[in-house]
Structure formats: structure tokens, C-alpha cells
Amino acid sequence: MSPIQKAGLYYPSKFGLITIKALEDVMGKNGLNAILNLASLNIYVDNYPPDSLEKSFDFADLSSINVALEEMYGPRGGRGLALRAGRATFADALRNFGALAGVGDLAFKVLPLQAKLRIGIPAMAKIFSQVSDQLSTVEERENEFVYTIHQCPVCWGRSDVDKPVCFIAVGLLQEGLKWVSGGNEFRVNESRCIALGDTVCEFIIQKEPIA
């Protein structure tokens, strides 16, 4: 695979660390090292990003990992691994951030489901906008929420696709919704993708959980 040009836009290194550790949990050390080598990220082999909020994990690095998963495991296998890595990233890290800290409180837990979503989804978007160069916004519609990523690290620098590819982001949203809602699973579909030539990556979240 040809290297993706660095974006000069960053996630906190902690997010990079969690994504890489999540992949190691899913595919083992050898599988992870193969992915990092394929992604031209051998700098991270046995040398994970530090556990800090310093913005140093380039968007291109996450995008390269995503491409390497697809190349090594095929579109379907890569998608499954990307979803799992995204879910693990939320489970490991994001629910401990300030904007979501109150979501674990009893007062929040007794709210009706739709009120939880109305508070929790924008809180997730706010974390990314605050601690990384990923600006995220949320719009509520009658039957769904629209979660928009304006500069997307998952597909950064790509234009080689024929359908949306940001499954790490989908997995992260799925796990975030599960946590915010107290255990429900929700349907999340990427409807627009920058890698397809769209101006943003857009995710449609159905308000009703999957029965």
C-alpha cells in the first residue's frame, strides 16, 4: 500500500495507544505487527504511543491502519476488526472523559432513553472537538440523530473507495450509544464519506434501539 501523506491534524497520543492495544487484543501481537508494518507504521512496533493527551497521533496514521486492515483481511474481515477496535477505543478511554463523566451518575441513569441520547451523543462529539483536531457536530431529526465528522481521521487522504469506510468511527459510536443508553444497541450507518468525495463523514443513528 502506498503511504498516506501526513495530515498535520492529530488525535491525542492516548487515542492512538488505545486503538493499537485494541487491535493487539483482537489479532495478537504478530497480527498487530503485520498490520503496522503494512501501514508503514513500524515506528509503533513494540513502541506504542505514550498514554498522554498531547496531540501527536496523526490522522494519516489511523487512516493507514484502516487501509492495512482491509488489505490484509479483505473488506469484510477488515470491517469487522475496525468495528471491534472502535468499540474497544470507547470502552477503554472515552467514557472516562469529563464531558461524559456525568453520564454514569444516578440522575442520568433514571432519565428516559431519548433524553439520554439527546445529552450523551453531543457529549461524545464534544470530547473529540475539545481534545483532538476532529471537529464533530450532532443534529437531531425526527427519527434519527446525524453525527457529522468534519475532518475525519479514519479515511484521511483516501479517494480509492466505492463505499463508506469509516468503520472504526461506527464501532466507537455503537459502543458509546450502548454505554450512554444503559446497554442498548443502536443502528449506525455511515451515509456520507469524505473518501467518496463528500465534504464530510456523516453517520445516521436511529433513535430506536435494535430490538
Image: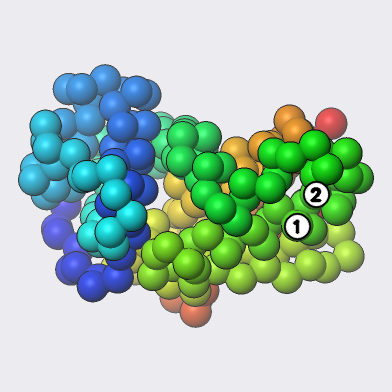
Q: Residues within 10 Å of mark 1 (few under 14, many from 20)?
A: some
Residue 72's quadrant in the figure?
Answer: top left
Single out the residue that lies furthest toward the bottom: 199
On the question of residue 161 being in view, the answer is: no
> Does residue 6 appear left or right of residue 15 in this picture?
left
**In the image, what residue occupies the spot 86% across and 53% down?**
115
**In the image, what residue occupies the spot 33% across and 55% down?**
53
The tally of labels here is 2
Residue 203's quadrant in the figure?
Answer: bottom right
Say what amino acid the circle numbered 1 marks: Ile
Query: How many angstroms separate mark 2 from mark 1 (CA)?
Result: 5 Å
Q: What percent of the width, then of the height, locates residue 49?
A: 21, 45
Q: What percent of the width, then of the height, locates residue 107?
A: 83, 43
Residue 31's quadrant in the figure?
Answer: top left
> Does residue 121 appear left or right of residue 23 in this picture?
right
Image quarter of the C terminus: top right
Q: What percent of the width, then of the height, locates residue 178?
A: 68, 37
Say what amino acid the circle numbered 2 marks: Lys
> Above or below — where is 101 with respect to 137?
above
- Identify the element where label 2 is drawn: helix
Residue at which label 1 appears: 119
> Above or below — where is 8 with respect to 186?
below
- Identify the element where label 1 is drawn: helix
Disc 2 vs disc 1: Cβ atoms closer than 8 Å?
yes
On the question of residue 25 being in view, the answer is: yes
**In the image, what residue occupies the spot 22% across and 44% down?**
50
> Does residue 81 appear left or right of residue 119 in this picture?
left
Q: Looking at the picture, tell me which residue is in the foreground, 75 or 123.
A: 123
Residue at which label 2 appears: 116
**In the image, what residue occupies the spot 62% across and 50% down?**
100
> Does residue 41 appear left or right of residue 152 in this picture?
left
